[in-house]
Image: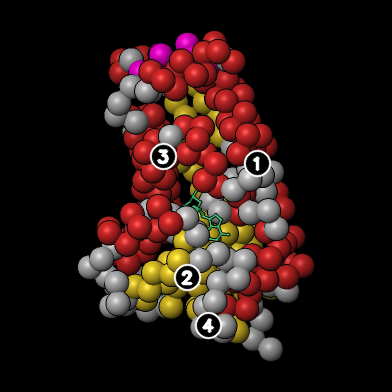
Amino acid sequence: MSYNSIYDIVGFNNEVNRLETQAKLGWKKEFRTLKWLGLKDGMRILDVGSGTGAYTELLLENLPHSSVTALEVDKKLFDISKDRLSDYEGNRLNLKFGSIKNSGLKENSYDFVVCRFVFQHLENPMDATREIYKLLKPGGIVAIIDSDRGMYGVSDPDMLFKSGRGFISQIEKRAGWNREIGRKLLKMLKYTGFEQLDFEAVTVHSDLVGIKNILGDNKVPPEIIKMVSRSNPRLAKIMRICSDSSQREKCTIIFLNLIAKGEKPIN
Ligand SMILES: C[S@@+](CC[C@H](N)C(=O)[O-])C[C@H]1O[C@@H](n2cnc3c(N)ncnc32)[C@H](O)[C@@H]1O
């Protein structure tokens, strides 16, 4: 099973919207943490699994002296990123269609690799850490951003997330995602040969980013509520509550985005 089996479950456009939102919500705090972990303007950056290019665009906008290579394996998402980033292409941006399993990119050529919410979709994630190791210059840094079901987040009311977890675990099973990846990341970096390891978590809090930016401006699409109501009527009820703007302003959601960092040794 690959990442894009999600399209059959939630629909391509819904997934694209989710990726757009997810990139923007995490950005401010992730960027702060990535800089803390060694990201600097002027570096040569590789964005692995760049999706729609939303995060790549934020990197380009906020690091005006950096060049970015964006690697993406899904043709539909790659084409979206190509459209959105056309002003940068050939200048500070190299868009590369391909897989991190065997990227075809030049070895020893990047200062910083960011790989965001990709590892949970990889069948053999150690292949990816080995490829990233090869692509980094000696002294280069990798930051893998992902999540883990054991520390995914909390909500108020509690049932909002508890029921959501049921829905997410159905998706996980059907799409074959590995949502216990967060706890494994640092050891994978260690076994690959990375040093100067570090591990951070950033929060996405609805009181700071706005509940509507997490749940969306629009109501949950009725077809999704209908689909969910068959297997999880409780969740469907919550989705209806979330679609009511006065009700949802009373809700709180906090997510944790985990960041595993390693450096390729100089010798
Ligand atoms: C959840 S999306 C995250 C997109 C983007 N990194 C972001 O944070 O907005 C996961 C992305 O990883 C890509 N992906 C999955 N396996 C990949 C692989 N082997 N090589 C490159 N990209 C891959 C998917 O096609 C998808 O675009």
Write the residue at 27% across / 58% down. 84
- Lower sequence index among marks 3 and 2: 3
Say if residue 148 shows up in the picture. no
Q: Nearer the viewer, mark 1 or mark 2?
A: 1
Q: Which residue is mark 3?
A: 12
Q: Which residue is mark 4?
A: 106
Image x and y of residue 261, in percent: 60, 64
Image x and y of residue 107, in percent: 57, 83
* Spatial CA span between label 3 and label 1: 17 Å
* Spatial CA span between label 4 and label 3: 32 Å
* Spatial CA span between label 3 and label 2: 25 Å
Check mark 4 vs ligand 1: CB closer than 8 Å? yes or no.
no
Check mark 3 vs ligand 1: CB closer than 8 Å? yes or no.
no
Say if residue 134 shows up in the picture. yes
- Lower sequence index among marks 4 and 3: 3
Q: How many residues crowd around disc 2 within 10 Å: few (fewer than 14), some, or many (20 or more)?
A: many
The residue stretch that appears in magenta:
234-243
Q: Which residue is mark 2?
A: 46
- Asked if labels 1 and 3 touch by Cβ distance under 8 angstroms, the answer is no
- Lower sequence index among marks 3 and 1: 3
User: Which type of secondary structure does the marked residue at label 3 adopt?
Assistant: helix
- Lower sequence index among marks 2 and 4: 2
Q: Nearer the viewer, residue 209 or 6?
A: 6
- Lower sequence index among marks 4 and 1: 4
Instruction: Tell me which corner region of the image, top left, top right, bottom left or bottom right, holds residue 200.
Output: bottom right
Q: How many residues crowd around disc 4 within 10 Å: few (fewer than 14), some, or many (20 or more)?
A: few
Q: Which residue is mark 1?
A: 176
Q: Residue furthest left?
A: 87
User: Which type of secondary structure does the marked residue at label 2 adopt?
Assistant: strand
Quadrant occupied by the N terminus: top right
